[in-house]
Amino acid sequence: MLDLCFVTTFILMGIPHAPELDIVLFVIFLVIYVFTLVGNLLILLVIRVDSYLRTPMYYFLANLSFIDMWFSSVTVPKILMSLLSPDGGAISFGSCVAQLYFFHGLGSTECFLYTVMSYDRYLAITHPLHYVTMMSGKTCALLTGSTWLSGLVHSAVQTILTFRLPYCGPNQIQHYFCDAPPILKLACADTSVNEMVIFVNIGVVASGCFFLIFLSYMSIVHAILKIHTAKGRQKAFQTCASHCIVVLCFFGPCVFIYLRPGSKGAVDRIVTVFYTVLTPVLNPLVYTLRNKEVKTALLKLKNRGVFAQNK
């Protein structure tokens, strides 16, 4: 139980690097973080003000952008603090619990949301005539609410399993944020059951979501190949290409970190940077650079701003 825990403060060891690279890495992560916030806020703004983007696909994209802003905010500020100050890696027990909960809550919600987005694309391409009625506003809200509820419940299980054990020292976490595997190595009790349950828990969620996404896109490819016109096939492929890129960038590192036997602290920390720091900034880039509708909406928003200034 939590009252048996003797550790009151953990020390995050951060990203492995030479000390002389502190300032360089600080600037890099700061720039990435700013672009993440600005890029995703811009997508939210464009979807909000452009009536042509008020469709199920962009409704889910807006939720994805909202998640990415907070998902990045759970870890990156602490990275910046640890790079800027020798004591920046210290984190209280309660803050560590909160960081683990929100990290897995937002990460799991994003995992479920990718699955819902693939289902949305499946309906749009394979059932175009019934798409509007099948993916109504009420259905979109229900699906989105389910992803949030499932993600937060899944995270609660992870957090309870991790912090129900006593921690009496040492207190150095071989990571740059509070994650279950490196924290369990510090527990003053047998963690084999916890590690097995967490492995199965994450494995079922990640594998299940990825399998459903794979099935959706196999059906989508089969439907696209039946389209008679080359222009129609190209448009359908372009619609799904951005989603596929983001899904691969997110699930690849997750599988590497959580679903492989053994763990190497330094390697895990470097790979984790990819989906905790880089994927949230890639989403707005992928969805804007590869999406004509979003680029058109951004241009309209820019022209509207220029017009307002001239007026």
Image: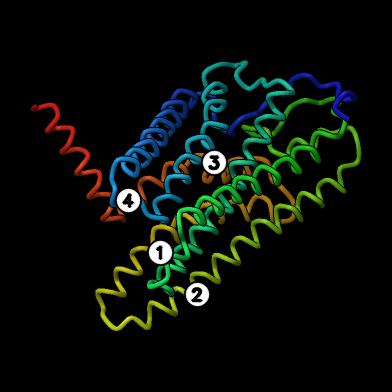
Give the Cα separation between the discs numbered 3 and 4: 27 Å
Q: How many marks?
A: 4
Give the Cα separation between the discs numbered 4 and 2: 26 Å
Q: Which residue is mark 1?
A: 132
Question: Tags 4 and 2 in contact by the CB under 8 Å rule?
Answer: no
The reply, left or right, for residue 8 in relation to residue 166 is: left
Question: Which residue occupies 81% across, 47% down?
Answer: 195
Sequence-wise, which precedes: disc 4 or disc 2?
4
Q: Nearer the viewer, residue 254 or 238?
A: 238
Question: Which residue occupies 85% across, 27% down?
Answer: 2
Q: Which residue is mark 3?
A: 276
Q: Position of residue 74 (x, y in %)?
A: 57, 32
Classify 209 as above or below 297: below
Sequence-wise, which precedes: disc 1 or disc 3?
1
The amino acid beneath tag 1 is Val
Q: Position of residue 130 (x, y in %)?
A: 42, 71
* Quadrant showing the N terminus: top right
The amino acid beneath tag 3 is Thr
